[in-house]
Image: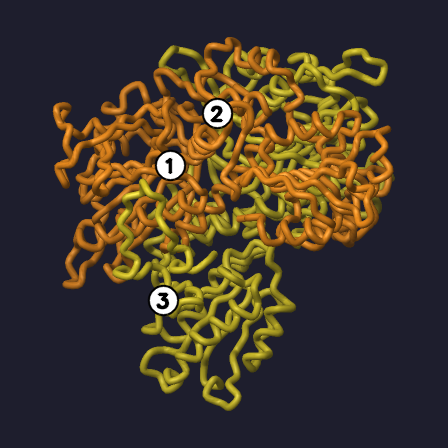
Chain colours: A yellow, B orange
């Protein structure tokens, strides 16, 4: 992001905009000299973390609806606000975390050849009738009529739509395949009982990929390729996961896996075998089955939150919509399909659920909304003479560590003690908290650095701080 | 984006994913040695530009529905595909351009202190009834009932919702204001006659910002600040625009401006004064008025496409939802509001409308989906011996000009002549097309570089190409 002033360029002849930059200093930032960049300050953020707990609870109407840790914490520190049952406002910190997550997903999907598209929300009823899911999905489908009486649903998933889209391409050759098409969009499902905050909402962001292959063999390879990309994604986020065999449900097809984060509040029951790699959702096992079908060893049970789901679809949808390509023999042939979902907002909430303490949000390092929080001394304290030092340190960090540009927040609420602000910072889960405290009076000045993810607290000179951040901070 | 292989890390104990990377080469890319990066190749893209015109027209059902140049071109070169009336699939090139546009918008909004939020699509009827817009909006509002019979609309705009959100914050102080909250999300409007492709659709992406100030004076300053940011945005995109006084319409308030791109197919009639800065939408002028209200000079008329709209709302919504803050005297006071829209998908289509020729798409340089297209010689031609050179040039470019990473496409359809591929590249509007042709046989090799935006064609050595791209390419 360039500074404001450097962008003030000549107007085109027709523009009649009156620029009043010099009269009005922007908001969230401390004013500072040109070329110095701007400092993000906490006092101007729309971030209701100052709310006391009693207020937070009243936001949701009744405190007994706060059914899990991530939902309670996300409300408490101002990450989300409820809008209507199962629908949440995502506040600025959450939007930043979500955008980082989408960037990691884009990287992983594009590394395996994924191409990003964007399909409409309104799904024409005729497409959903063709697959019989207009009736099968029942009340989970939110439906409406337009001004002409034409029926639509709000897409909870897009198998019908994308298959019709690919089927409209009449000249596809086997040489072009496989296609791996994906989108990251808001999806809708009229949950009978929305709960757990972002974990089971009626509106949510999902990454859905659909693959089109020329043979069952290559489709299987594509299926493995996408599953491997999912594994890498969760590895990069530092989230322990289980890839479990699963039911195909209403999507259909003949092979399916769920990616589950093991945690007590999980709604899925999983059977895992400690001796071999087998794991499966209990719903696909015979209830009397207590031994692993693969190695006959005893199965153990755990609960999980489903964060990803993959399906090998075969020609279920391509045969309905006639999605064909020309094969190596010049003959038309039905595409072999797969579909692959990742719950974007759900991964955020599930990660917070598994990583956080009872009182403090913890993020996958890559996704933390801001990497660094800088706490200057309290106004009127004897360290207050070092408060200019805080500003300089802020500028040094963002200049010397370019990938931290936009990632450092200055907690300028200097009417509060360092301790109180540290408590807030701890709750919000910045990976690094830097305190300009007593030892900043030393020569050379030393700063107190809290590394949240390792639990370490160290005192470092400015150079030490820069070196630590340069080498330790992960940014997407 | 790191290479595939470097990301293949150790699995967590519970993960049971079988990685088969070595058996299966990803898709859209030419395989190449580790560390070399991957080459984006055109033959594997889901990008129906090879369709002949007769096929393109049939996609839309009837050719007379292609009512403007941008719609026709966007269908022809495979940027969008129709899904249902007023709803389009955005194909990969368009998604890339849109993501770049959103990045520019984010930069400009955040430079003035904008904070990004994300509000639900489902707007509870009670909020819309409170402002009377549930009835006023009539058939433009898409409405539905959930499984419990509760009524919602699909948000075309979010004044009600954001004001209720801010009103829920009971401890706002004047010291925290102004807040500039914005989102970039899909909006819905049941247009009586959707047309012009993305220019007037029923689903579209919009950037909507809402501002909350502590006094009418600061609210006016915030209004100017946002208008100035809009001016800078259109300047950066190289789009000539008119900022015209406008009607407040159903949004309400007491001051409003439209940002218009002047073009013949525009649906708005604008009066502009060549002698002073005055310009206005004709709908707010007395029909008999032919002289400028500011300088009395004669007015001229032009047509425009509205791409942005700003409103100073006063307390219209804050009084309905009781959005208050504590003022400097410790008393509760209603927030002064503004709202500000940018049509994201509409800016894309309008830019294509004003910049393109009849046959060839042209983009604002910053938004071009890919900056460079590299065309190697035709298979079997006498230049074919240089085709390895093309691959090397591709690698050199992406290594030597880091901001071009992911921005270079290799048109590997070497069964086609250079001329045919150049024609395709010209249609798609890559800012730079590099041809490995006859003069690549010289020592040193020379490459033919088409600079689409200046109309120049130059022959350069490899070093010259790198220097040109390093200095001339604009990337967000």
The x and y percentages for residue B392 are 79, 47
Residue B186 in view here? no
Instruction: Give me the disc on residue A30.
Output: 3
Q: Are marks 2 and 3 in contact (CB under 8 Å)?
A: no
Residue B70: give its label.
Answer: 2
* Discs 2/3, front: 2
Give me the chain letter of mark 3: A
Residue B238 in sight from this viewpoint: yes
Residue at 55% x, 23% y is B359
In this view, the residue farthest toward the bottom is A443
Q: Is residue B306 placed above or below B365 in the rendered structure?
A: above
Is B434 located above or below residue A192 in the figure?
below
Q: Nearer the viewer, mark 1 or mark 2?
A: 2
Q: At 32% across and 22% down in the image, what residue appears?
A: B140
Q: Chain of mark 1?
A: A
Distance from label 2 to label 3 (Cα)?
43 Å
Residue at image mark 1:
A84
Viewed as shown, does residue B16 lie left or right of A24?
Answer: right
């Amino acid at each position: 992001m360039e500074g404001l002033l450097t962008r003030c360029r000549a107007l085109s002849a027709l523009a009649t905009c009156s620029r009043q930059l010099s009269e009005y200093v922007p908001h969230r930032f401390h004013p500072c000299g040109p070329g110095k960049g701007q400092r993000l300050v906490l006092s101007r953020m729309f971030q209701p973390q100052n709310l006391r707990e009693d207020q937070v609870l009243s936001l949701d109407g009744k405190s007994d609806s706060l059914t899990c840790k991530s939902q309670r914490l996300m409300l408490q520190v101002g990450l989300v606000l409820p809008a209507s049952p199962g629908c949440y406002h995502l506040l600025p910190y959450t939007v930043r975390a979500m955008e980082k997550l989408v960037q990691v997903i884009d990287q992983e999907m594009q590394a395996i050849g994924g191409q990003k598209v964007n399909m409409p929300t309104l799904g024409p009823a005729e497409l959903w009738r063709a697959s019989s899911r207009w009736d099968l999905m029942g009340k989970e489908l939110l439906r409406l009529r337009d001004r002409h009486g034409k029926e639509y649903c709000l897409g909870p998933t897009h198998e019908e739509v994308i298959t019709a889209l690919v089927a409209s391409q009449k000249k596809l050759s086997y040489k072009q395949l496989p296609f791996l098409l994906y989108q990251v969009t808001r999806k809708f499902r009229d949950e009978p009982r929305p709960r757990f905050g972002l974990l089971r909402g009626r509106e949510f962001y999902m990454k859905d990929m659909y693959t089109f292959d020329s043979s069952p063999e290559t489709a299987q390879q594509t299926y493995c390729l996408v599953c491997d990309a999912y594994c890498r994604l969760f590895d990069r986020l530092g989230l322990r996961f289980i890839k479990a065999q699963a039911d195909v449900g209403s999507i259909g097809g003949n092979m399916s896996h769920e990616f589950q984060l093991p945690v007590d509040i999980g709604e899925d029951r999983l059977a895992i075998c400690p001796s071999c790699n087998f794991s499966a959702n209990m719903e696909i096992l015979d209830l009397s089955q207590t031994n692993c079908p693969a190695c006959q060893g005893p199965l153990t049970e755990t609960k999980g939150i489903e964060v990803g789901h993959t399906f090998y679809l075969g020609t279920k949808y391509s045969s309905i919509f006639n999605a064909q390509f020309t094969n190596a023999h010049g003959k038309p042939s039905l595409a072999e399909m797969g579909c692959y979902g990742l719950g974007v907002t759900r991964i955020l909430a599930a990660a917070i659920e598994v990583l956080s303490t009872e009182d403090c949000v913890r993020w996958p390092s890559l996704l933390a909304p801001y990497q660094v929080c800088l706490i200057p001394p309290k106004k009127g304290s004897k360290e207050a003479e070092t408060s200019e030092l805080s500003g300089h340190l802020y500028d040094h960090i963002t200049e010397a560590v370019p990938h931290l540009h936009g990632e450092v927040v200055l907690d300028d609420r200097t009417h509060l003690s360092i301790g109180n602000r540290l408590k807030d910072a701890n709750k919000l889960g910045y990976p690094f908290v830097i305190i300009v405290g007593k030892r900043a009076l030393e020569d050379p000045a030393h700063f107190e650095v809290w590394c949240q993810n390792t639990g370490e607290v160290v005192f470092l000179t400015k150079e030490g701080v820069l070196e630590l951040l340069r080498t330790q901070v992960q940014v997407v």
